Image (spheres, rainbow, N blue to C red):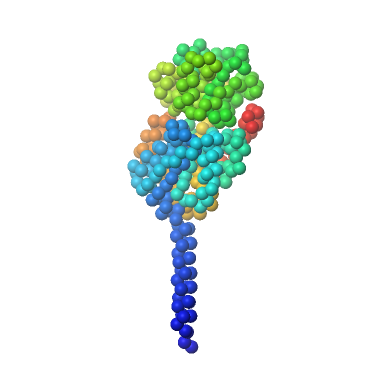
């Protein structure tokens, strides 16, 4: 039986269309590998100059230098303890060419800002490092030790300002844990929140009335001022003493073992990624942390490597969010 020419053309067009659809689906499924290797956007959910921005730019440099990605750019999305950036990432479902830096501070932001999304809804990539907190005072302060600090705090808790980062962030939580450990109600904390380490250090060094005499922040925010003698570190919130400030006791050594909170750093990707897309991003980050550039950044920034990827990282995110939420609720901060 002869098929009419018009029908034959129709069948041919349908077949070609079907092949195009199949090819498009296959290309979409494998897009994570090709797209992420050629172009990657790393979101830093904070303003330039902060800890998340530092991690994003160190990763960018390491990936560029070693050719892990042809084109990698950093985009800053500041605000609300990182939850504005998290909200934007949640809308990029299936985008295998995006990563976002995250960590402990964001978990506090999720609770404090009643975020509609949390990290467990994102695609887990990897935890890569830990950053440590420092409690410091101006060099000319009469507070020479943590014992001096606690005594002054207990004597006048409502007029003893302590400065740190965003309300509900890791600095604030450490202040709360320290207060509880010292026998002070969390409600008595006079906490002054600042947008970044630069603003905080400026206030610490100011003689203006009402500015904090004690600051809590990441070691990198205080490092230069400690090294040049303008700030004096009283305690590091770390499992062991830090290189460069070996004379400064850990929280446990200073008598406050309950003050145990690490500012971990890691990466998540948008929701809805395929296993191939997720696997490619994990491979890329794993390659990145092995580069000379990243290893130099770890040394330079006094980070501690702590690798955890994929499903195990997802489990950590769920459990750590519960812990952070509990701390904030216990301290009356949530």
Direction from residue 116 to residue 218 in the image, left or right: left
Q: Going 45% across and 15% down the picture, which residue do you hit?
A: 139
Taking 118 as reference, is 241 above or below it? above
Quarter assignment of residue 166: top right
Out of 138 and 251, give the one closest to the viewer: 138
Residue drawn at x 49%, y 39% as measured from the top left:
77
Q: What residue is drawn where x is 51% and y is 32%?
A: 263
Label count reads: 0
* Residue lying furthest front: 6
Q: At 41% across and 34% down in the image, what residue appears?
A: 298
Q: Position of residue 129 (x, y in %)?
A: 47, 36
Could you tell me residue 78's position as x and y percent? 50, 36
Residue closest to the eye, 224 or 150: 224
- The answer to whether residue 236 shows anywhere in this view is no
Indicate the position of residue 160 as horizontal and vertical percent values: 58, 17
User: Where's the C terminus, which quadrant?
Assistant: top right
Image coordinates of residue 294 in percent, x first then y, are 39, 38
Q: Is residue 322 above or below residue 135?
A: below
Residue 180 visible to the viewer:
yes
Q: Residue furthest bottom?
A: 1
Note whether 5 is above or below 215 in the view shown.
below
Decide which of 252, 301 is in the foreground and name it. Answer: 301
Q: Residue most toward the top?
A: 142
């Amino acid at each position: 039986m002869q098929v009419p020419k018009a029908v034959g053309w129709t069948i041919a067009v349908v077949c070609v269309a079907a092949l195009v659809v199949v090819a498009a689906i296959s290309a979409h499924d494998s897009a994570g590998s090709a797209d992420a290797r050629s172009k990657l956007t790393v979101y830093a959910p904070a303003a330039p100059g902060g800890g998340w921005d530092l991690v994003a730019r160190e990763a960018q440099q390491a990936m560029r230098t070693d050719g892990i990605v042809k084109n990698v750019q950093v985009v800053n999305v500041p605000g609300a303890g990182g939850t504005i950036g998290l909200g934007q990432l949640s809308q990029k479902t299936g985008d295998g060419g995006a990563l976002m830096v995250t960590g402990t501070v964001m978990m506090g932001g999720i609770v404090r800002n009643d975020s509609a999304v949390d990290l467990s809804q994102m695609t887990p990539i990897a935890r890569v490092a830990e950053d440590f907190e420092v409690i410091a005072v101006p060099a000319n302060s009469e507070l020479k030790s943590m014992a001096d600090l606690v005594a002054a705090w207990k004597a006048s808790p409502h007029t003893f300002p302590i400065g740190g980062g965003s309300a509900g962030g890791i600095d604030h939580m450490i202040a709360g844990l320290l207060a509880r450990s010292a026998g002070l109600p969390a409600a008595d904390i006079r906490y002054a929140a600042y947008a970044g380490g630069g603003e905080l250090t400026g206030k610490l060094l100011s003689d203006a009335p009402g500015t904090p005499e004690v600051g809590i922040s990441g070691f990198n925010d205080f490092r230069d001022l400690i090294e040049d003698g303008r700030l004096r570190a009283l305690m590091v919130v770390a499992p062991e003493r830090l290189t460069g400030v070996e004379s400064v006791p850990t929280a446990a050594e200073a008598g406050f073992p309950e003050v145990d909170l690490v500012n971990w750093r890691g990466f998540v990707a948008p929701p809805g990624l395929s296993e191939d897309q997720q696997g490619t991003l994990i491979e890329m980050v794993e390659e990145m942390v092995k580069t000379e550039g990243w290893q130099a950044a770890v040394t330079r920034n006094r980070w501690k490597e702590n690798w955890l990827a994929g499903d195990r990282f997802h489990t950590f995110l769920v459990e750590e969010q519960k812990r952070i939420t509990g701390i904030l609720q216990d301290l009356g901060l949530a």
